[in-house]
Amino acid sequence: MKIVADENLAFTDYFFSEFGAIQHVAGRNLSHQDVVDADALLVRSVTKVNAALVQNTALRYVGSATIGTDHLDIQALNAAGIPWSNAAGCNAQAVAEYVITALLHLKPELISAEQNFCLGIVGLGNVGSRLATMAQLLGWQVIAYDPLVSKESVTQVDFSALLAQADAISIHVPLTKSGQYPTYHLFNAASLAKMKPNAILINSARGPVVEEAALMQDIRVTHRKVVLDVFEHEPEISEELLQLLALATPHIAGYSLEGKARGTQMIYEAFCQVFNLAATKRFETQLPSCEPYFAQADFKTVLIQYLAQIYDIAQDDANLRACVKQGKVEQHAFDTLRKNYPLRREWAAHGGPQA
């Protein structure tokens, strides 16, 4: 069996080497020629899996170790009779922790804000619901908007109410351009104008959910703090945009070791189901032990003392800004940061809570 896999997938050899030869490739540059005689294709979000890629190939399975599916042409896969799977929720905990880390980095006093701070969450899927739980552990007031999901544990409001009430808004929706509730440019000039001028905005979902030009104009007027992990014109990022952002990171919000490993395990399990094989491996057996920070003190005290050691978000921001050349961050630099991303663990690895 021939398996073509994105070279940046975690633990690919551990999970798949027993089944055949693995060809590790650069996901963004994957071509039809790379997969024409492959039995299985394993990708991340940088690979556009479309009809041109998969038609007239030997492919019998496509697995994407990602939460999102907007890079997959599901209609083309179904038409070609190729089973596929993604890894919904694989890095949801990591993204939730990224959001809280960003907020506490920008405003350390939020650790003791309790109900005086209102976090608005747009999208209550795997990530949004976990973020709500983690924010509630901190004592924050949490409101959410999601017309497609109902959660009793969270106060849900309409979009306009969330924009008006929230002290910070975190976006956790898929990118959609059709249907009753499209998310493309959901945050545009009109919606940004409804936010509190000093409300923080965080986007770790998909770049085009926020209209970049409108966002830049909004920041110039309001001077609001904005955190972007995803960008409308990713992988290129203009220096002009970066200079306006409070924090910028290269699409790594979900890049915990656990999140990466969990994603690969989920597509491994689906692969085994498609090929009628026994799925016997678990990513937990491959992870190194960590410093048990949370065993030493209570939750909030640990975050005050050790958050930068657990995840140094400022370093990710500095690394991205250091890549600016001739007015922008280019694709190669962006991809290199992601490929060489340092080891990052979720709070639970340090003995902390998880949603």
Image (tube, rainbow, N blue to C red):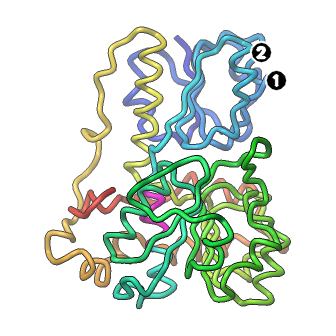
Vertical order, 2 against 352 (above or below): above
How far from the left and from the top, in percent, is residue 25?
63, 34
Q: Which residues are magenta?
A: 94-100
Compared to 74, does 346 lie above or below?
below
* Cα separation between marks 1 and 2: 6 Å
Q: Secondary structure at mark 2?
A: loop
Amino acid on which the number 2 mark rests in the picture: Gln
Q: Badges 1 and 2: C-beta atoms under 8 Å apart?
A: yes
Q: Amino acid at mark 1?
A: Ala
Q: Position of residue 15 (x, y in %)?
A: 39, 28
Observer-nearest of 337 and 153: 153
Q: Is residue 96 magenta?
A: yes
Task: Name the residue rendered at 19%, 66% in the picture.
Answer: 292
* Image location (x, y in percent) of residue 234: 75, 57
Q: Is residue 12 left or right of residue 139?
A: right
Task: Look at mark 2 in the image and give the residue it sits on.
Answer: 55
Q: Nearer the viewer, residue 68 or 46?
A: 68
Q: Nearer the viewer, residue 123 or 54?
A: 123
Residue at left offset 81%, top offset 73%: 190
Q: Which mark is residue 52?
A: 1
Q: Is 28 placed left or right of 25 in the picture? A: right
Q: Is residue 326 left or right of residue 29?
A: right
Residue sitting at 16 percent across and 77 percent down? 297
Q: In the image, residue 132 lies at what x, y percent? A: 43, 63
- Residue 207's place in the image compared with 10, above or below, is below
Q: Residue at x 60, y 67 (%)?
A: 249
Count of numbered circles in the view: 2
Quadrant of image for the C terminus: bottom left
Q: Main secondary structure of the magenta part?
A: helix
What secondary structure is found at the residue carrying circle 1? helix
Asked if residue 223 lies in the magenta stretch, the reply is no
